Image (cartoon, rainbow, N blue to C red):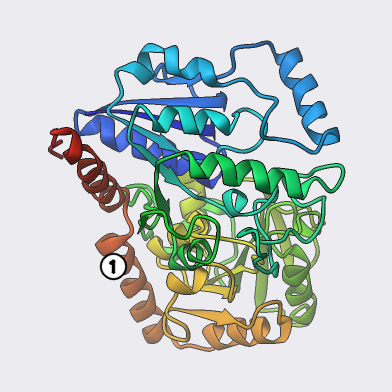
Amino acid sequence: MNILQINTLDSKGGAAKVAYRLKSDLASRGHKNTLFVSKKYSQDEDVKLIRPYSNLRQRINKKLSYYLANDLDLFPSNHILGLPEFKSADIIHCHNLHTNYFNLSTLQKISAIKPVVWTLHDMWPITAHCAHSFDGKIKKSGFFTCPSLDIYPPIAWHNERYLESKKAKIYQKSHFHIVTPSKWLANKVSQSVLKDRPLTVIYNGIDTEIFKRSDLKSSRSDLNLPQDKKIILIVAKGGKSNPWKGGNYAEEIVKRLSDKPDILFVNLGGNNNKSDNLINAGYISDEQILARYYSASDVLLYPSIADNCPLVVLEAQACGLPVISFDTGGIPELINHGVDGYIAKYKDAEDLLEGVKLFLSFDNNKIEFIRSNLAKKIEDGLTIKKMTDQYLDLYNSLQEPFGQNISS
């Protein structure tokens, strides 16, 4: 089988990791798989830049798209149809099509020629411009409202009517099968302009050869972390400066527990300064080291306020780490509340703190039971292999009308 994937990036960010890991697992099974991206970080020869123009032109178009409040029309991508990777593909698998590299009208042209799968990693397809609507409501147009112009991807002025109209017209003339990595997003789609499109829920999968349980004491020793403290791991990239990851809520929990000498916070990816009860470990790009941090900790504090099916939750659980989070997006689908993690009321710092205290109060036997069950839960159903199996089943179903069936 030959699959062409399209995404913004190839290795940074959740959508990129999902696309690249799917590509790698498909290749290991003998399937040809090419990934077209706007920006390439890997050295993989099967990852190819999609842009037919210079970096200068890209920067100019990016500025124009912001000031014209239009990220749909300025980026040429019809040339894809003439590329050999497109011509030889059995399936076109789209991921994120926003962020200034893809002309959405190309989707209509692609889907007239090839079967298309579109995995929605955020809400951009069902809003005017933003990747998440937060508390936004559905409008008569079939699109969810964006809370402000500044929500990523930002626009300079209120051009929502045009953006919604243009998307709706493209969708009417396009054929694609939607995948969402959560039931939460599937429910949003069912209310939207895309409500009549075929949809399958396929959860993201992770590499359990990397993300797996390691001994807590040896992990702490490797990372120079104390053995005699309860360690609360924080993943809130960008700290308070990132409105998506709830860094301000994490900071509040750190303050509330600052008088507990037996508790240490380890902050990954944040920009907080070091204090008596907090170590800022910075951004960890090495997944082996990241897995050690998960294994070295007692709980993960993940106060995200905008999410779908976050890999960090799955990675932590695969390493046996209970996750304390808000009732955000698809996160409650990944956590058994009060059993192997805690789902606090949305944006309720007090309830978030209660979850942290509850899981820190458990004795060693209960914690070991939780850790073992978490790792088994991921191994049984949320792996890359399972995700790839489900995508192959979907690809097969889309190929059947064309008289082709692809074995896995």
Q: Is residue 357 above or below residue 146?
A: below
Camera-nearest residue between 310 and 275: 310
Element marked by disc 1: helix
Q: Is residue 277 visible?
A: no
Q: Quadrant of residue 240?
A: bottom right
* Front position in the image: 225 or 142: 142
Q: Is residue 196 left or right of residue 124?
A: left
Q: Position of residue 56 (x, y in %)?
A: 76, 13
The residue lying at 45 percent from left, 74 percent from top is 335
347 sits to left or right of 219: right
Where 174 sits versus 80, above or below? Answer: below
Residue at left offset 80%, top offset 43%: 155
Q: Report the amino acid beneath label 1.
A: Lys
Residue 332 placement (x, y as % from top left): 49, 74
Answer yes or no: is residue 198 visible. Answer: yes
Residue 328 position within the rendered picture, expressed as x and y whole percent measured from the top left: 59, 70
**Would you name the residue on which mark 1 appears?**
376
Query: Quadrant of the image for the N terminus?
Result: top left
| Residue at 68% across, 29% down | 73
249 to the left or right of 37: right
Q: Residue at x 62, y 27 (%)?
A: 101
